[in-house]
Image (cartoon, coloured by chain):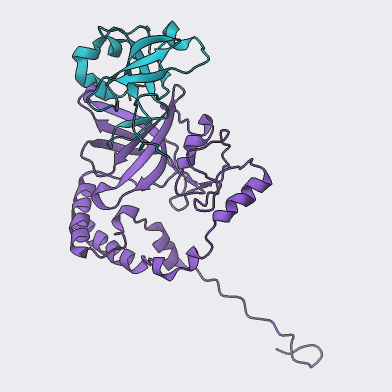
Amino acid sequence: RVSSDGKPPKFQPPPKPVIIDRKTKKEESRFLSPEFIPPRGRKDPLKYYIERKDMIQRRKVFNIPEFYVGHILAVTTANPLASDKSSRFVGICIQRGGTGLGATFVLRNVIEDQGVEICYELYSPRIQAIEVLKLEKRLDENLMYLRDALPEYSTVDVNMKPVPRMDHEEIPVNKVQVRMKPKPWSKRWERPKYNIKGIKFELPEHKMQAAQKWSQPWLEFDMLREYDTSKIEEKIRKELSEELEK
Amino acid sequence: SITGACRAIQKLTRVRVVDNSALGNTPYHRPPKCIHVYNKTGVGKVGDKILLAIKGEKKKALIVGHKMPGPTMMPRFDSNNVVLIEDNGNPIGTRIRTPIPYTLRRREGEFSKVLAIARNFV
């Protein structure tokens, strides 16, 4: 271009390219239930392969929704001793444990001022329906401290209607800081071993610092404890997609 | 120390009386404690009868929930719940507000009157 002065035109940097990362978005949205990942050990992987086949068979017949710790679920189980032969329990999921067909999750609720927890097996044939009433992740993966928290944090309305989910991408994280009952607690939740971020500790400073004595900062660098599941997860995802298409 | 393993209800456990009887609800300076479990083992689970010491008296009671985790699908309560009972099995209170596990319905013959006054089942 011809400029007014005869000097070269002012350098205009080219427009930055907009990168739409479609690949990573797809990977994040594919949820793999934690019970599919085999634990670290020297067992024959054939055992886990057979278990996964059985798990997929069950999932084809019965829909197990995607849920995390902190969601509010309603589970209807077949119970010969109940009227109508089925019973319904609503509660917050506080823990997901076990691997394979023995995978469990614990639901907690406070009914008539009495805290009740029930441990359900995901793949039990007695379960007739699992509904997710509210999708909400929490800051921790284990909400066992709700036992020592004020009962208002564990109360869930039994007749709650399912909250409609807006996006199909994000699950909101509830950053609530739970207030606790006075000590003694069932476990010393202030210790760094539990690494809890969801409690509002109202303990004096010297107690919080004394709890740090039990911290083990070398644990995160321990190479023998490392368990990289990315490759195992890829394999299992492939298997799942193949089996579910059949 | 010689603390035992986490067992459900045994001798000297403090229990919580759940029905609306006068004996269970009037305040006393000592909590109701178990003094005997009517079982071959000394450990009481849901549906076992125990002897309680309340307000200086001995009274039989039925366990309706304990803090110890049981088999999967069984509810685990946050307190050791108990319903006061006579020797013939008649409950002393008239209403039980706290939830009671369905497994008690299995022994309909023995506990029919207790189940009749229960409101919620879990």
Measuring from the top left, give residue A38's x and y in whole percent.
Answer: 29, 59
Measuring from the top left, give residue A64's x and y in whole percent.
Answer: 30, 45
Q: Residue at x 45, y 53 (%)?
A: A169
Residue A3 left/right relative to A109: right
Q: Residue at x 47, y 30 (%)?
A: A155
The tint chain A carries is purple
Q: Quadrant of the N terminus of chain A?
A: bottom right
Residue A111 left/right relative to B60: right
Residue A33 visible from this viewpoint:
no
Residue A150 left/right relative to B51: right
Q: In front: B38, or A132?
A: B38
Q: In front: A9, or A205?
A: A205
* Location of residue A149 with respect to A57 vertically, above or below: above
Q: In front: A66, or A113?
A: A113
The tint chain B carries is cyan
Q: Quadrant of the C terminus of chain A?
A: bottom left
Q: Residue at x 22, y 64 (%)?
A: A45
Measuring from the top left, give residue B58's x and y in whole percent.
Answer: 37, 10
Outermost residue toward the bottom?
A6
Q: In front: B26, or B37?
A: B37
Measuring from the top left, give residue A112's x and y in whole percent.
Answer: 44, 21
